[in-house]
Image (cartoon, helix red, strand yellow):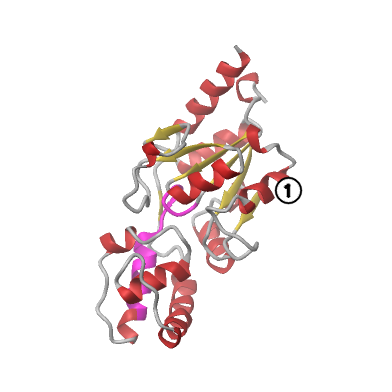
Amino acid sequence: MSDEYLSTEAILFDLDGTLVDSAPDLTAALNHTLKILQMEPRSEKKVRGWIGNGVEKLLHRGLTDSHNGVATGDDFWRAKNIFYSRYKEQSGQYSKLYPKVIETLQNLRQKGIRLACITNKDRCFTLPLLENLAISEYFDIVVCGDDLTNKKPHPEPLLYATSRLGSIPDQCLMVGDSASDVGAAVAAKMKVICVDYGYAQGINLSSLEINGMISNINQIEDYVRSVSLEKCG
């Protein structure tokens, strides 16, 4: 590995809103569910503001048409069964990688940096999506929302990944698009940078405890290099 990269052992990536624009798939599956339940569809713009806390939270928001809404038991479980069936069928059909994602993952792997994907999305949706978008091969480990007891913003998924990678948290970097990513990284005592194009749910991420903000995923390479050179100097 180049000396420029020695201070970053691993990079942990969020999935939705960071590597993948999954809002079109999630909107289609949600509106299919609502149609069967004879409810009004939700706009993709609105759904984009609801993404980031897992599918169950998205369903609660979609069913109640409210960010903090909680659907009633029977309605929620019926909707969950419909949504899960539909989303499994179409996961990746409408989702797109953000620009430069594959190129960046390739370059980081070539530098010897270990990579992980940390998502609040369930494993049954995550793995097909990674396969369909041809990026699964780049990750040494994938930690999903239903793998552990806690999801982001709890630090458990990040600490589990770094442990499995044999890395020290303060020598790792989290890359995400939400307050959940930031909260998990800060709690794990890990550096964190955010993309400015994801699903921030209206939160000004620059006001949080982040180490940087980027507009394109390939800027991670420059960030990692600058931090490494600063430490070496």
Relative image position of residue 131 (x, y in whole percent): 55, 58
Which image quadrant is residue 231 in? top right
Crowding at mark 1 (Cα within 10 Å: few <14, some 14-19, many 20+): few
Which residue sits at x=45%, y=62%?
92
| Magenta range | 15-33
Residue 8, horizontal then vertical, whole percent: 62, 30
Measured as percent of width and height from the top left, residue 212 is found at 44, 32
Q: Which residue type carries mark 1?
A: Arg
Residue 213 quadrant: top left
Say which of 77 and 124 sits in front: 77
As for residue 197 lying within the magenta part, the answer is no
Camera-side residue of 164 and 149: 149
Vertical comparison of 37 with 6: above or below: below
Residue extending farthest to the top is 233
SS at circle 1: helix
Whether 158 is drawn above or below 51: the answer is above
Which residue is found at the position 45% from the left and 54% from the top? 16
Q: Kindly identify the residue that appears in the image at 46 percent across and 79 percent down.
A: 80
The N terminus, quarter of image: top right
| Location of residue 74 in the rendering, given as x and y in whole percent from the top left corner | 44, 88
Residue 103 in sight in this render: yes
Please give left or right for residue 9 compared with residue 56 in the image. Answer: right
Residue to which mark 1 is pinned: 164
Residue 30 lies in the magenta-colored region: yes
Placement of 181 over or under 25, stated as above or below: above
